[in-house]
Amino acid sequence: MRTAATAWMAAISAALALGIVGSLGGCASPPRAIPDAPQALPAPSPGPLPAPLAQAKSRWVPARWSDLPALEQDALHEAWPAWLRSCEKPAPAWRALCPQLRQLSDAAPAAQRQWLREKLQPYRVESHQAQADGLLTAYYEPLLEASRRPQGRFTVPLHAAPSGLAPRKPWFTRQEIDTLPQARAALRGKELVYLSDPVDAMVLHIQGSGLVRVREVDGRQRTVRLAFAGTNDQPYKSIGRWLLDQGLTRDASWPGIKAWLAANPARTQELLWQNPRYVFFREEALPAGEIPGPKGAQGVPLTAGRSIAVDPGSIPYGTPVWLDSSGPQTPLQRLVFAQDTGSAIVGAVRASRSVSISWRVYQGLRVASPVGGAYSGTAKRPCAWRLPSSTGS
């Protein structure tokens, strides 16, 4: 995502989309292009399926509602608030359905499921080469301790964007930022807070946003969000993958990476420099009461367990998606929503699911989803998913 990047990878075994896209007629016609947002359609009938649809990076193949496993078991009332978030910034085709979604927010699950079947047409998402396998990752929002100024163990800065930073114009690499006087001068005065651990800083760079409990100069403590504000436009490289490729570890989870660094502290910078991408942040004050999720690329706050990051060239923002994953501990079969993206989210069948785990000093997890622990950096999960597209009315 642009505000929260992806972390751990897991295998996906198949995907379907429940789209608003396409027409129910013309089943014998060839696939046709669809716009950035799905088009409103008449309600589906039990008759012949509509024709496949072509996105820029995917092909949508029509499916039956009976193809969606465990639809009757999902707690749709838990998904509805995330759907209403998408209605804060809806695509044109979804705008007409948002009043109905609001009216159904307190409806019984049976009524919500009936509405889905009447208004939406399921599609399976696959590549243009008919490949339905892909990758599923998870990401979260860390909660870290920080200081407003460098002191004691708090020596690792997080920076606001420097002046002159421009999209699609590569800036200094991570190693150059740490070593070149010109880069260091450009970031002087841009320090927002200081962390105590360079790996925690890397985690925040990869996630793209996070909460920090910062100690102010006057001794007060408060929690703020550091939101994504840009990058140096250098490619992302996984430091865990580098360790694996070098044969230095068999455990590329974050605990495994920290364990390797504890045994090899002199190689900390060498490891971190393998990822040339550097992320810049902006500070956001938090509202009183319950803290909302960070904003995704759709421009709406993410919802724990119900928001996913996708390649918008394959799945437009705001599209509802049926996720079907047989995990190592518990299956994931639920309605989620395409509300975010990320530099590592590329291709037809690729998604990253927001589980909104907040870290307290790295390993103190605040789990906002009962399945969040399964994404703690060690799980590899097969996943099939389907996207519901709205048909309009």
Image (tube, rainbow, N blue to C red):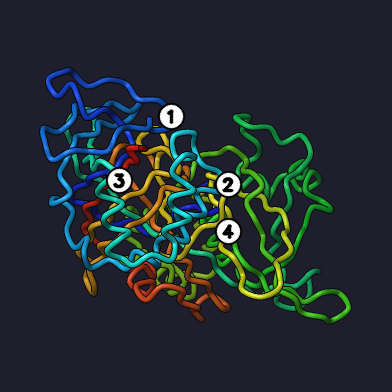
Q: Residue at x 21, y 58 (%)?
A: 382
Task: Read off the residue under disc 2.
Answer: 299
Q: Nearer the viewer, residue 159 or 33?
A: 33
Q: Would you call the spot at circle 1 few (<14 residues within 10 Å), some (14-19), or many (20 or more)?
A: some
Distance in Å between CA atoms under marks 2 and 4: 9 Å
Residue 221: x, y in percent? 77, 79
- Vertical order, 311 against 238 (above or below): above
Distance in Å between CA atoms under marks 4 and 1: 24 Å
Q: Is any atom of residue 277 visible in this view?
A: no
Q: Quick one: label 2 or label 3, which is nearer the N terminus?
A: 2
Three-letter code, disc 2: Gly
Three-letter code, disc 1: Asp
Task: Read off the residue under disc 3.
Answer: 388
Q: Is any atom of residue 352 visible in this view?
A: yes
Residue 221 shown left or right of residue 307 in the figure = right
The label shown at residue 36 is 1
